[in-house]
Each structure stands twice: as C-alpha cells, then as structure tokens.
Image (cartoon, helix red, strand yellow):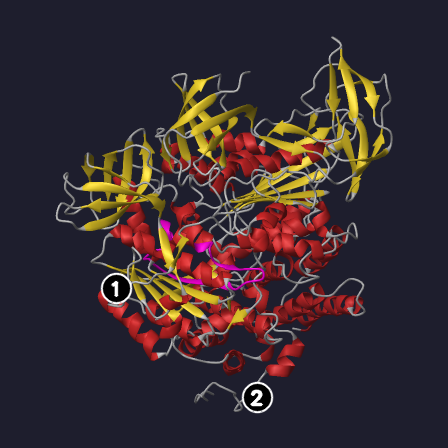
Amino acid sequence: MQKAQGKVTSVNESLVGAKTIQGAVMNGEVAYIVIEDGKRLKAEVIDVKSGNTVYLQVFEDTGWMKVGDPVEFTGLPLSVKLGPGILGSVTDGLQNPLYELGKIEWFLERGLEVAPLDNTQKWHFTPYVKIGDKVTGGMALGSVPEKLFEHKIFVPFSLQGDYTITHIAAEGDYTIEEPIATIKDGAGTTTELQMAFEWPVKRPMPFHERSVPVRPMPTGIRILDALFPIAQGGTACSPGPFGAGKTVLQHSLAKHSEADVVIIAACGERAGEAVEVFKDFPELIDPRTGKSLMDRTYIVGNTSSMPVAAREASVYLATTVGEYYRKQGLNVLILADSTSRWAQALRETSGRKEEIPGPEAFPMYISTLISAFYDRAGVEILEGGNSGSLSIVGTVSPAGGNFDEPVTQATLLSTGAFWGLSRALSDARKYPAIDRIDSNSKYPSLLEKEEVAYLLELLRDGKSIASNIILMGEKGITDESYIRYQKSELLDAVFLQQNSFHEVDGVTNPERLRLMFNMVREIIDAPVRIAGKDRIRSQFNFLRQAFLDWNYMDVNEEGFEKQKTKLLNLIKQLVHVAENV
Amino acid sequence: MLQKTYENIDSIGRAILSIKAQGVHNKELAEVLYPNGNKAFAQVIALDGDHVTLQLFGGGFGVSTDCKIRFLGKPVQVGFSDDMLGRVYSGNGQPIDGGPELLADRVRVAGPSINPVKRLIPKEMIRTGVPMIDVFNTLVRSQKIPIFAKAGEPYNRLLANIATQTDADVIIIGGVGLKYDEYHYFRQRIEEAGSKSKTIMFVHTHRDSIVEGLMVPDLALAVAEQFALQGKNVFVLLSDMTQWSDYLRQVANAQDQIPANQGYPGDLYSQLASRYEKAADIEGAGSLTILGVTTMDDVTHPVPDNTGYITEGQFYMKDGYLELFGSLSRLKQQVNDKTRPDHRSIMNAMARLLSEAEERVKAQKFGSVKDDYSLRLLEYRKTFQRELMDPFRYLELEDALDLCWDILAQHFKKEEVGLSSNLVDTYWPEKGKFNVLKEMNHE
C-alpha cells in the first residue's frame, strides 16, 4: 500500500481533519502531523469520509497546529512491540518508556518518541529449533530468561502458514534488534526474524484453543476469595463512587493476587497513584517469588492530564501485552483503572465528530467496545497442552455513583464478577467497602458452595434484623434475633473487613482463609442463649476484639496459637455462660 | 513573528467570535482592535478551513463587525518573576492593583504535565491546626484537595486560614467568580497575616468576562509551577471551581458542543484534571499543593462528582462544620503512621463510633432509641461535633489527639471503643484528669 500524504484542514482540540493529496488511507492507521517547529505529533485515523477527507485523533496537544500543516501517513495500524524487556517497565499509553522520556525532559513534551523496548540490552538466547524444522506463527524459536521466567521467542503471530528454518542463532547473547532466525515459506521467500515483533493493539490475538475459567485466582482479599471470587482468565468490575476505595482495592490486588504477571493500566486517573506503584513496588518483595514485586509488573500510565486520545490506546496496549504473556503460558492479571475514563475519551471524540449521541452523550457503540474488551480475557490452551490465562479487573467510575449509567451497565453485561463499592460502607469505615448483598460472582470460591451460601444467608438475616432495630429499637426484637444480628456483625467485622494497610491483615492466603472461616463458623454455630442485649453485645465485643488481635498476628508468631486458644475459650464461654443462665 | 490583521468578522457571541483568516495557529493569542483604538485579548480555540473561532477575554458585548482581529503570532503566556510577589493580577495577566506593569520573563500557560517519574510519593504532613484535618484527614504536601460546600459557607475563611497558618513559601490565590467582598476579604487576610510579600493574586470578579475567569487557574498554576521548579513549596488556592466549570459550560455551548451531563461538556473531567494534576512534589525541586473550593448543593452534581474522582479527597463543610463523613484525605495514610502511635487507631475508632451514632440518629426518628449504650452514642456525637468539628478551632495535633481520648473516656468504657489494649493502657485518661476536654457535669 502506498503511504498517503495529506494536509490539515481543521483543528478542534484532539480531533483534526485532513485531506489526503495522494495514496490510499486506512481506517486505524497511524499518521504524523508535522507542525511549524518541526515536531511530529502522532495521530490515528478514526474516520474516512468522501474518499479523501480523514479524521484523526491526535495523541498530543494540538496547540500551534494550523490549517495546511502536512500529514504523513504510515500505512500501519497503532501497534505494540512485543518481546523481552516489558516486565518491570513503566510506559505511557503509546509504549514510550517514562523513565527514558524523563532523561530528555522533565515535562511530557509533545513529539517525543522513544524506543518501546531497550534495544541495547543483551538477552541470553537458547534455541529450541534447528535448521530444517517446520514452524508457523506462534511457535517458539527459543527462549531468553526475563526476570522470573523463561521468555519464549515466538515466530510472529501474523506469519500464518508453513515455514522452514534456514538459519537459527546459536546460544548466546543478542539484542532484540539482532537477527535470530531466518525462515522460508513454500514459495521460497525468506524472512529474517528478531526477538521482538509488533502486533496491532486493537486486534485481539487469536486463541490457540479457548477454555472456560474455573480455577480460582486467590487475591488475598477475604471478601473476594470467599464470597465474590475471580477465576484465572475471568473478568470482574468494581464500580463505585469516588472515595469508596477503588484505588486501595486495585493496589491490594496488584500486590497480592496470585498471578504471574500483573499489568496496571492507569487510564485517565491520578498520576500520584501510578507513582505510588512504580516507586514502591521495586522495594517490595513478593513473598511467592522472593523477588521484587516490580519484576512481575508492567505499568501503562496514561494519567488524567495526559492527552485524552491516548487513553484508549493505553487500555488496548495493556491488553495486547497481557495476551502476549498469556501465550507464554503465564497467568496474567490486568487492572484497568478506569474504564470510564476511556469511555469518556471516546465520548469527547464522538462529540467533536458530531456523531448522534446515545444515553448521557456516550457514543452508541460504547457497549460493543466494552464487551469486546473484556472478551480478550480468558483461558488459553497452548500448543503442547500448557495453558495461560488473562484476567481483567476493570474499575468503573459512574457519574454520581449511580450504577444505572451506560458504562456500568455495559460492563455488568460483560464481566463475570461484580464488586459493587458502596459509599455507605466506606463512610462506616467497613473496608473493603464491597457491597455484601448486591455483589456477585459466577466463579468458584475458595470455600465450598454451601459455605458461601451459609455466610450470605447470615449477612442477609443480619441486614434485615438491623433495619428492624432501626424501626423498633433493640428492645423491639428478641434476644435470639439480636444474637443472630451480632453474629452477622461479627462476621463482617473480623472476616469481611480487612485492613489493607496492615502487613499481616492486609493479605490472607488460602490456608489462613480456611483457618479463619473455621473459626468464624465455630462462632456462628455456637448455641448462644445469653439473656439481655447489653450482655450479648458486651460478650460479642470481647470476642470481636480477640479475633481482631488474632487477625493481626502472623501464623508463625509466638502468640498465634495462644490467641487461637483464647478465642476458642471465649466461644466456649459464650455457650457456657448460656448454660449457667 | 509576523502579525496579521483581519477584518471580516463572521459572528459575535457572548464569549466567542468567528472570522475568516489564513495561516492562523491553534491556541494563538489575538487582539480585538476596536474602531476607537481600544484593544482586548482573544484566543484561537478552533480552526476549520479559513474559519477561525476565538474566545474573547473581554466578552462579546460591544464587539462590532467593524472591529479588526490581529493575530499576535504567540501563544498565551504569563509573566514570571519574584517581583510579582505581593501583586494582584486579572485573568488576562494585567496588574489590577494600581502598580506598574512588570518586565517579567514570559512562561507558557497550560503546558504539558510533569513526567510521573519526576514525581515523589507525597510524604510530608502539613500541619494546619484544624483538628478535623490534622487528625482525621491529614493534609499532605503536594496534595490537591477542594472544600465541598454550599455557597455561603465560610470556605474562603478556611482557605485563607490554611494558607496563612502553614509553612508555604509562596501562596498563589486564583479567584474565579469572586464577589467583590470576597476578593477584598482575601487581600485583607493576607495582609493581616503578614503574608502579602509571599502572595500573588490572580483575580476574576463577577464584573469581568467569563473567559478571563477561565484563564485564572491556568495563570495561577503556570506561575506556581515555576516557583515549585525553583524549589519553593507553593500553595495554590482556587476558589471557586464550580463557577469555573460553569464558564467552561458556557463557552462549550456557544461552540455548539454536544453536552454530556446537565449541559456540561463531555471533557469536563479532563479539563478539571489537567488543572488539578499540576499539584506535585517534584524530584529535586519544590512542591505545588492545591486547595480548591467546589460549591455545591448535591455531591452527585457533575462538578463535585468529577472533582471527587480527580482530587485526592475533599473537605466537606456543612452548616459551618467540617464533617467527618463526606470528607476524605487520600494521602493521609502516607503520613499519619509517623505522627503519634495512636493516631491511626484513634482516628478509626472515633469514626466507627460516630458512624454507629449516626445509625442511632436514624433510629431516633422512630422513637426507638432507649437503651443506655445508644443514648451514650448520641451524647458522644454531640460532644464530637462541639469539640472537634469547628473548622476555626486551632489545636496542635497532639492536643487534638488527647482531646479524642478525653471524649472517648467521657462517654465509653475501655472495652467499648475497640482499641488495642496497649494503646488504651497508654492513653486512656482517668476520669477527672482530662487533658483537653473541659470537665462536664456528667455522672
């Protein structure tokens, strides 16, 4: 395809119109607009009208652009570079490494582009194939060690068809730009391959074979792992008003989830939150690997004051990288915060294009895009029988905290777990402020099915008794109901609530979750029959206090078993006291 | 740079003008030349072929079809120098305090955001002396945080208090849509506090055009950013960002943009964010802290709602009190574990009990609150409000923490407050030996 040339005809914030002078133009291709000072501003074709009129969304500030500025089309769609070196890095939404940009300028000056992957670093390559072997796109040529695992070097996925190896590099150290292999197709055309290749961000990578997400992915967050779990390869969304704890939840998931790779897409959110992650994580040791937490993390930071058009790119960039590591046979978790900001970016552009708006001025196609995005998650059975998974947790920031809006609704249709964040709970400091009644998940829990139902039933009972107490006062209900209510409050306080800032309480592994659940069950099952609300409340206060103290103790700590015994004694006392009465 | 003058004005609106012109840059600064020799600034906001749209700093009133537009070949800039300290400027950057115009360096306005890798994790508490802030929602250097309040609440007084009671090197006041007496109040407070020599004001009052109002935060933040890059700790006060958003809505509607919610443009979030995100603690340099005001009736209104998603919390002021519920400092966790060992725990305990008390307030309406514990919760709530929620009570953090213990001891038994035994043993005051709380004739 001949690359097109064009000239700017209109400028309206990030939406720029252009007329092509020659050459064919493709929807989705990347173009550069060259402004007066010679800076080249990256843009993407989002619409072609009447043959030669093109609309571009510009990934940079359009100040100082003028009508007539030249537009250079590249003929290539917006793509991500895939290869070793992604883990541990921080890039903007267009895969420019932020630390590299920071060496050039303090501010995110426009028109700067840096190689997405370090092309000077040498990687130790071990070949898997030899000359004469038959290969096709997606097969591994060899591998290099990257951080925590062997990073397979693939024949680019776009090369479908049968190829023969005519050259393969010997074991040794190479950069991602050095040739690593040469392959020949049936017609005799040869292609030289490197360790990195490109893939268009908006095109989902095909699954080799797709499977259903059924294996739980422990998150260390009790209310999720017990009641509203996510599976490896599953999807979840956490809509909620501001201040209900979305960010803390995301950070906790990023730290503690049992995934091999965590990708954080900070899309249109506060810069400070991304900074916290990429400045703290290198210092934190991941107990599962003994290595720095940053080694398994990749951060895409397109924060709220960065150019709006790149928000969409940032979400797709994260997803494409996620799919790539899934092909490596790893379990990948994407945390997209926030998909609403992406949707708003689409709304801005749609408005400037004067498209007919849907509800709340979002474009009509918003739900299709959201569903297609979550559909990129999933479990993949790879060639040879290994599997990898990509899970996506998206936050949603609904206007006014009202879930009845287009982005939340479209997301609920597309995800398997719903973690509804509630302002009432966060006001009451009941963190994580995930609604205990309205949230749900279709994935299997770490607990047994009947155990989950048992807990949910108690919570529903507790809620209904609580509203009776408001109406009729404590004196208006029976002691039996009051005990049931206290049990439900205790379950909430010691099991569902969790102090994510505490070293021990902040993360609960599956073994400890089981231990705690058993203890909670002891309490719930205890035949308490104390008379008098004050005595009941006071007994449960003691119990809650002892349980919280236990929660804050490490299992290997000296007092841990002692505290457990104390708790069991307190539970016995409940029953014992009852017998005395 | 070549300056071109055009005279074929197409249309004139309340804030917007369009004209046919060529070779014009997006965001270029221009002048409206009146037939009588007067001038006013304008800025290019959109280009379509030879059709140029400008926003008028002086508004559209009085602009005629025989005015000319001169494009100045430069973007909007603002002066920057130490000599600006103590001065007052309008939303178009001109001095309005009767003093001379300065020959200052010009710096860009609304520039790109700082590279996140150049940001530090905020780690330094700012002591304000306001108990609801220092104890419950600690302010941190480089935080961006607005006061949410109904119009008429004393938010500007609190803003001025915080700015003058703390250790800011430079204070920049960005007044948007100020009433004249509010403007006067800020000037007076700054002078009384002896802070004039470290303060610059950019002021837009109701008699000025909305486009000037729109410019104020950008001018204030551009100047503040320069001071921060020089190593200064800068406080920017922005009051009132709801009016600013309203001006944004007016200009967007004048451009026939498709509105999103309640007439606000779809990019309201991004517009607010690109201002608030200027707040930063900069590696190897100073810091920029933003305290804003967002007037509101209802927190789900688009302006407070979008703001809440952008800022690092908010202080919620209601009926003259700083409320606990509805207020939030997202950065407090960065600092409140380094103040006093009981800080976090007592903050949580006080909040949990207050939330329990709020439940009883609901129940009280049904006349169903009769038990002793509930009645004590209600009493606790009253004491809390009286002793802690006054935004103008000045207490050092340590005294405020002691006061919290006093209040707990006044109303509860040790085992009722849910605090760990070693904290209770250390801080629980004996009856009759309160540290801060005046003894009540209770029990």
Quadrant of the drawing holding the N terminus of chain A:
top right
Of B33 and A90, nearer the camera is: B33
The residue wearing badge 1 is B96
What residue is drawn where x is 65% and y is 24%?
A206
Of B90 and B336, nearer the camera is: B90
Q: Which residues are magenta?
A: B276-303
Would residue B377 be found to the left or right of residue B154 on screen? right
Residue type beneath disc 2: Glu
Q: Disc 2 on helix, strand or loop?
A: loop
Identity of the residue furthest to the bottom in this view: B432
**Residue A185 lies within the magenta run:** no
Q: Few, some or many C-alpha atoms within 10 Å of disc 2 (few <14, some 14-19, many ≥20)?
A: few
Would residue A457 be found to the left or right of residue B299 on screen? right
Of B68 and A443, nearer the camera is: B68
The residue wearing badge 2 is B430
Of A44 and A62, nearer the camera is: A62
**Percent from the top left, x then y, of residue A129?**
85, 24
Q: Quadrant of residue B14?
A: top left
Number of callouts:
2
